[in-house]
Amino acid sequence: MNQRQFDYIIIGAGSAGCLLAKRLTENPDTRVLLLEAGKRDNYIWIHVPVGYLYCIDNPRTDWRFRTTEEPGLNGRSLIYPRGKVLGGSSSINGMIYMRGQDADYERWVNETGDSAWSWPEALKRYKKFEDYHGGDNEWHRQGGEWRVERQRLKWEILEVFRHASKEAGIPFSDDFNRGDNFGVGYFDVNQRSGWRLNTSRAFLKEAAKRPNLTLRTGALVKQLKIDPATRRCLGVEYIQDGSVHLAEAGKEVLLTAGSIGSVQILERSGIGSAQRLDRLGIQVHSDLPGVGENLQDHLQLRMVYRVNGITTLNTKANSLWGKAMIGLEYLMKRSGPMAMAPSQLGAFAFTSPDQARANVEYHVQPLSLEKFGEPLHSFNAFTASVCNLRPTSRGSVHITSTDIDAAPEIKPNYLSTEEDCRVAAESLRLTRRILASPAFKPYAPEEYKPGNQHQTDQQLVKAAGDIGTTIFHPVGTCKMGRTDDPTSVLDSELRVKGIGGLRVVDASAMPYITSGNTAAPTMMIAERVAELLNGDLQ
């Protein structure tokens, strides 16, 4: 058994872990160990934007989790991608830069009692790591590590949807990141000159050159080492190349393994529901029933429309000549379909006047397919996916065995509340209103999925269960909250309740999901902890 001492040990080189590694090693006297279960990010399809097609559900880059069979999805089980590689899920995600809405952060303040999570404070942190294409202004900054660019493509069908949305009452927007994202426009993406930018390249590439950072890949954490007398986390036991290693942390262990991985490590280490851990024969160090609970995710309802008289990627990519031209365009210009994020056009809208702020998000694509991993349809069509931004359904994730290689049980419980079912039905009707706008009339759109035969609320909820799928935004499984909240796992500074020297710094800390894509908010959370640990609270 090998042993080494560090000041901080970071578990997981994803969106939070890479940023933390860079920030903490800015002090040359601080020794940091960064552990990543996956491999290095030297797989070409990580960096070509369209390569997400080859990274998701690929053991080279993805943990390949699955959900249980979901009652709300009519008994279907879904793949549940999580990055297993340097950069974590930022190496396989949709590259969309999205902060959410200002009111999301006020909910966090109300939940935790800590004004450090307010929108103005969060905005300062976003601007610290951001390198915005439009330069410095009230909302953005140029010069940070995290490049934010406009997309390098245009599709006529997306322009049609944009104008139809305006006709349906959704205004044009050129920036979804100013606190109120109501509107329709093109997503900003985390790319640099047509290449994906993951957090490994943005933060770790420079930090890895520092002598005070030790990076170990292929390092699977078995458990945290906790002193039962002092109830303090002393270090980490992990497996690398078939050998067991022990690393000690003089200051803190920072768990950044994500909403699934962090729960697995906590529960294997005796932190979680005492009743659950007792059944698995695990010694309990802190009875925290909230570990693994409060799982929230955005369920996207993938509506597909056939269109006439307009070209989509379906037919552009259905010939060898078309594929060759697509490849040539990317090779010569770093633009076109190979530079595409999975979704290009976005819209944030209200499904009913009862909503105080935009409550659904659209991801619109100039293509269609039966399900992820299958070929594109042979006919011209596009996909308008719509998700409920603030679902009230709550799920869970838990280990089922002490076996380090055993997959966790993931139960999102999609569409398990009346509110979520109502919003689902309203969302499908809203999409139909957009498609009925004059802008679409020349193209005679035909609803291919789920089909116009679904009209009543009951039929639409059933249809939502048939076409719904995850948009890969799991959060909340180690939520922060007030110290007297029995369901919270962390305090407002992300310290694990009842255990010293241990924080969870990733999307699992969110008490409520943000109203949009979750990669950037996860990085903002890490920036907050870097402030706390470095004493930089200005």
Image: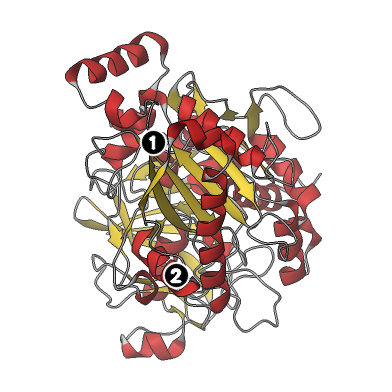
Q: x, y percentage for residue 296?
A: 51, 66
| Residue 461, numbered circle | 2
Q: Can residue 187 be seen in this view?
A: no
Sort mark 1 into few (<14), some (14-19) or many (20+) by Cα contacts within 10 Å: many
The image quadrant of residue 402 is: bottom left
At numbered mark 2, what does the secondary structure look like: helix, strand or loop?
A: helix
Mark 2 → mark 1, Cα distance in angstroms: 25 Å
Sort mark 2 into few (<14), some (14-19) or many (20+) by Cα contacts within 10 Å: many
User: In the visual, does 83 lie left or right of 416?
Assistant: left
Three-letter amino acid code at the position of disc 1: Val
Three-letter amino acid code at the position of disc 2: Val
Q: Mark 1 points at which residue?
A: 307
- Quadrant of the rendering where the C terminus is positioned: top right
- Residue at 45%, 56% in the rendered image: 300
- Residue at 37%, 57% in the rendered image: 450
Q: x, y percentage for residue 119?
A: 77, 51
User: In the visual, does 223 lie left or right of 116?
Assistant: left
Front disc: 2 or 1: 1
- Residue at 38%, 26% in the rendered image: 309
- The one of 72 and 441 positioned closer to us in this rendering: 441
- Residue at 27%, 25% in the rendered image: 317
At numbered mark 1, what does the secondary structure look like: helix, strand or loop?
A: loop
The image quadrant of residue 74 is: bottom left
> Image height check: is 217 above or below 450?
above
Q: x, y percentage for residue 63?
A: 30, 54
Going from the N terminus, do you reach mark 2 or mark 1 first?
1
User: In the visual, does 237 lie left or right of 299?
Assistant: left
> Image height check: is 204 above or below 119?
above
Colour scheme of the rendered structure? secondary structure
| Residue 223, numbered circle | none
Q: x, y percentage for residue 483?
A: 70, 78
